Amino acid sequence: MFTGLIREMAKVVSFKNNFLTLKAKYHPKIGDSIAINGACLTVVKVTSDTFTVELSPESQSILAMENYKDEVHMEPAMMMGDRFEGHIVQGHVDCLGIVKSIKQNGNSTDFFISLPSEYLKYIIPKGSVTIDGVSLTVNEVLKDSFRLTIIPHTIENTLFKRYKVGTKVNLETDMFARYIYNMFKGNKEKKDELSWGDVDKIMANY
């Protein structure tokens, strides 16, 4: 389990034959789980100054592999007793999002992210979402996208400084949104029409 708070930008040393080798101040152990751009991966090799994770063909088919170069977001798995920040992140990427537009908004920047329609139901206004491993708050949900407002500190210290219109990103929806939606969708005859207003009404009956 992760929190969506990036602990370090790791440098990509190489990516060959499904093995991604990284250099970072953090030194994991073999077998450790570590989130790289939001995807939970297993450490399979360590040296004095690098560590290597393995990406299966399945993982590579889901992830935005074009972002696994130069620098990547890195977050070690939470340990029991750690301070809990961000939100609960599983490291299980649901789909790829695409940066639809970028607009300046005073001292912050709005990023509009589009995503496949079947995942939009898990995006909740003022809820949480993970973009390339970064825990963020959804400010607005639109017909086929959602808006994030990013402060300069986050942009300067993450891959957001490299994002352009058309950039693909790893997207993980909020775990609780998925669970709650699937728990209550059976209460509707037409399951694909369940809205968050419906969920509120159902929960009010308990």
Image (cartoon, rainbow, N blue to C red):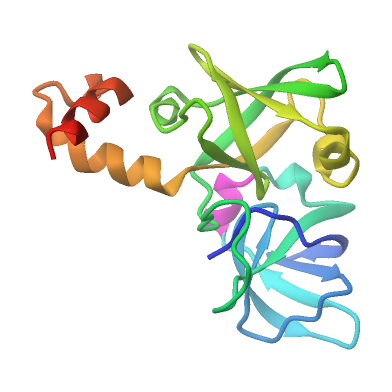
| Residue 101 x/y as whole percent | 73, 15
| Residue 151 x/y as whole percent | 81, 32
Which residue is nearer to you in this view: 80 or 190? 80
Q: Left of 24 or right of it: where is 202?
A: left
Identify the residue at image location x=43%, y=22%: 117
| Occupied quadrant, residue 190 | top left
| Occupied quadrant, residue 204 | top left
Identify the residue at image location x=51%, y=15%: 144
Q: Is residue 149 magenta?
A: no
Which residue is nearer to you in this view: 24 or 4? 4
Is the residue 29 above or below the residue 54 in the image?
Answer: below
| Residue 45 x/y as whole percent | 73, 83
Q: Left of 119 or right of it: where is 188?
A: left
Identify the residue at image location x=20%, y=35%: 203
Identify the residue at image location x=12%, y=33%: 205
Task: Farthest residue to the top: give it.
Answer: 143
Which residue is nearer to you in this view: 123 or 108? 108
Q: Is residue 58 magenta?
A: yes
Is the residue 22 above or below the residue 47 in the image?
Answer: above
Type of secondary structure dominating the magenta stretch? helix
Span colored in magenta? 57-63
| Residue 102 x/y as whole percent | 78, 18
| Occupied quadrant, residue 41 | bottom right
Q: Left of 24 or right of it: where is 169?
A: left
Is the residue 196 above or below the residue 186 in the image?
Answer: above
Quadrant for the C terminus in the image: top left
Which residue is nearer to you in this view: 202 or 142? 202
Instruction: Report how many numbered discs are placed on residues in the image.
Output: 0
